Amino acid sequence: MVDDSLKREEVKIQVLLEDIGLLEQYVQELSTFFPLPLCFISPIGVMLEVNPAFEEAFGYKFHELIGESLGKIIEKKQAEKLIAETIKKGSVKASEMILRSSKGKEMIVGTYTQSRIDEKGNFLGFFLGMFDLTDLKKATIDSQNLAKTLQAERQDLRDAQKALMNMLEDTDEERERAEQERNRTQLIIQNFSDGLILIGDRGLVELMNPEAEKLLAVSKQESVGKKAGTVFPLLAEVLLDPAPLFRKELKLQSPRVVEVTTIPVEMEGGLRRTLMVLHDITREKQIEQMKTEFVSLAAHQLRTPLSAIKWTLKMMLDKDLGPVTKDQENFLGKMYESNERMISLINDLLDITRIEEGRYLYKPDFERIEDIIKSVVDSYEEEAKRKNISLALTISSQSLPRVLVDGEKIRLVFQNLVENALHYTPKNGAITVTVTLDKKSNEIETVVQDTGMGIPEEYQNRIFEKFFRANAATRVNTEGSGLGLYLVKNIVEAHEGRVWFNSKVNEGTAFHVALPIKAERDDIASNV
Amino acid sequence: MGRGKVTVLEIMNNPQAIKEDREKAIAFMEMKGDIRGLSLIADYEYVRHKLGEEGVRKVEKEMALLGHPLPLKEIKQMEFYSIGYAGVIELAIERAHSFTMEDYYEMGRYAPKSSVILKVMLKYFASLDSAIVQATNIWRKYYTVGTLEATEVNEKERRVIFRISGYEIAPSTCHVIRGYLTQVTQMITGEQVASEERSCTFRGDPYHEIVLTW
């Protein structure tokens, strides 16, 4: 009986143990699967139990928390306050506090507590539920910050928009000014009386105005963007010259004549361009031509009656027409000299017209220049004596080569120079003519040096101009026409020679003429 | 539970050591008294915590090798087992992982954290006196042999002295119990607790005496 009773008790105990085991398992599962962080705290604030959700939420392992004070994870004062409030009120709801995670990160949590009281009303501790509010708080703060940032950015945008509008207004004004400036420049270029062409550094035409189109008979559309040398064959001569040009005369299609000036210009970015200015001188050239023709015609027309007068006077002076009194002879003599001067002037004018028409040199040949000069000097020997002026000729002892010249015209050069020296050298003065060979420059240089009145400095740059006579010269020699030195210069340059002078007032003047030496086999026609 | 199978090869590798340990195991198993399953589970759980599943498997294997297999999953928390298993499992742990005395102390500290019995008794932790009284009652919930009593509870001087009599398994077990009592006291006081085994039956004393201060 006792054994049976013991057996029954053992069975009951076994059943109870199984029930306890199941109950423990149930509680364990409930705690394990409860999704919210939950913790049981002892009355003195020691953590006695945490569920897996608590471990996961705050990164602790349960063994790191169990037996530890609540102060390990929240600030001690807050923990004490929480316990006190829970004891006092039985529960706390949604109290916010800062929790330190296992990695030391501060997290904002919402806490809920519920006290445990035994049947006698003793406080046995409390359950603590915690919710991580970090993300929520962060989202709130972020949204607040975002709102502030957005507001600030909106303000920035408004400011930027305002600044942009101001800039746009400024830019518009600037653009308008630039536009006006451009239009003005365009207007000037379009209406400029000279032709303007802008050529880029690769020789491409970049711009040309209507006058240039007219002068070159080429449209802008046909030229811009193309090689200047290709579209302007008439300008080939000047386009090949890299040096800047100033008023170079150029014949285009007859009768068009222009003066070409090229100006190198450097634009922004260091790009080099060439501005070409075409100044139309066709009308000036035509007027000049008409003047030359008129002078030629007038001179020819005058020379015939003057010749008749000359020969009539000569006959009267030679008494071929009967006897004349002494007084009549004097008058007739003066008339004859005046007529001679008139004929000489007309001859000079005719020479000039021939020079300007380019048909002056018509008898070039190789001649000994020293012979021509000697002949000229000899012809003035008598006059020099009469004026009591010494006239000397010095010819280089070296053998001088013959030079290609129009003998008659070269004679005229030296006649003019010696005659001028005689006119402007006072009594007891001296004139020396020196002929030398300059091997270095391959020229024969002749110098006509006098001890005359000299040329004042202010007139020196005009001395070779047509009809120019210095004031002092007109007082000393009233017969001069002002054409002599003009002829000298034109004749020497027609021989591709050079003429220049050195002069000092009251000391004298030295005129230099240098003529090039050419091999006698050179083609005469091509040089003259 | 039947005896575990031990391979001839294993025995041949270290026949003398195996032989000695198996004899020790037999001696443990011949001890009178029972122990709650949750105490054995707590030992396994600490091994898992420290060394992972592989660590647990090695201990289970050693248990088998010692001739008393007791896999973790087969242990029921509330069930009573021969108290000899407390010695055999610590012997197996020592064989598998060469635990030091400090390791056994930590193993003891770890046990209350997952103790269902302790959690049932939590409601008594409101004051030190009542908690200590309940703590002594815990002993009989774990073991059917020996006694635990608090010979001194001095809240003012922050000291408690526990005495354990009639319980003599192995020196390692002393460290496990010292760790356990340290952790329980810490949970009651909420303070960091230091401990010392002032008397020990393995040192010739008539009982075990553990002093806890905080």
Image: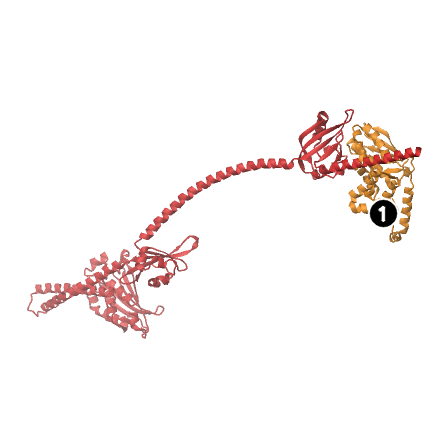
Kindly tell me whether residue B97 is visible in this rendering: no
Indicate the secondary structure of the residue bearing disc 1: helix
Whether residue A88 sits left or right of residue B47 in the image: it is left
Report the colour scheme.
Answer: by chain
Against B153, residue A176 (above or below) is below
Identity, as a three-letter code, of the amino acid under mark 1: Glu
Q: Colour of chain B?
A: orange
Q: Residue at x 79, y 27 (%)?
A: B127
Image quadrant containing the C terminus of chain A: bottom left
User: In front: A452, or A417?
Assistant: A417
User: x, y (%) of residue A471?
Assistant: 22, 56
| Mark 1 burial class by Cα count in 10 Å: few <14, some 14-19, many 20+ | many
Query: What residue do we see at 32% from left, 57% from top?
Result: A213
Q: Give the colour in which the image draws chain A.
A: red
Dot 1 corresponds to which residue? B62
Q: Is residue A5 above or below residue A311?
A: above
Q: Quadrant of the N terminus of chain A?
A: top right
Asked if residue B2 can be seen in this view, the reply is yes
Pointer 1 indicates a residue of which chain?
Answer: B
For the point 46% across and 41% down, the residue is A164
Count of marks, rendered view = 1
User: Which of the pair A401/A435 is nearer the observer?
Assistant: A401
The quarter of the picture where residue A376 lies is bottom left
Q: Is residue A184 left or right of residue B46?
A: left
Q: Position of residue A384 (x, y in %)?
A: 21, 66
Q: Quick one: which residue is furthest to the bottom in this view?
A: A521
Residue A492, image x, y percentages:
28, 66
- Give the percent coordinates (x, y) of residue A267: 41, 53
User: Of B180 and B30, which appears nearest the observer?
Assistant: B30
Which residue ends up furthest to the left in the rendered image? Answer: A322
Image vertical order of residue B150 relative to residue A413, above or below: above
**Along the horizontal axis of the image, is A297 left or right of A254?**
left
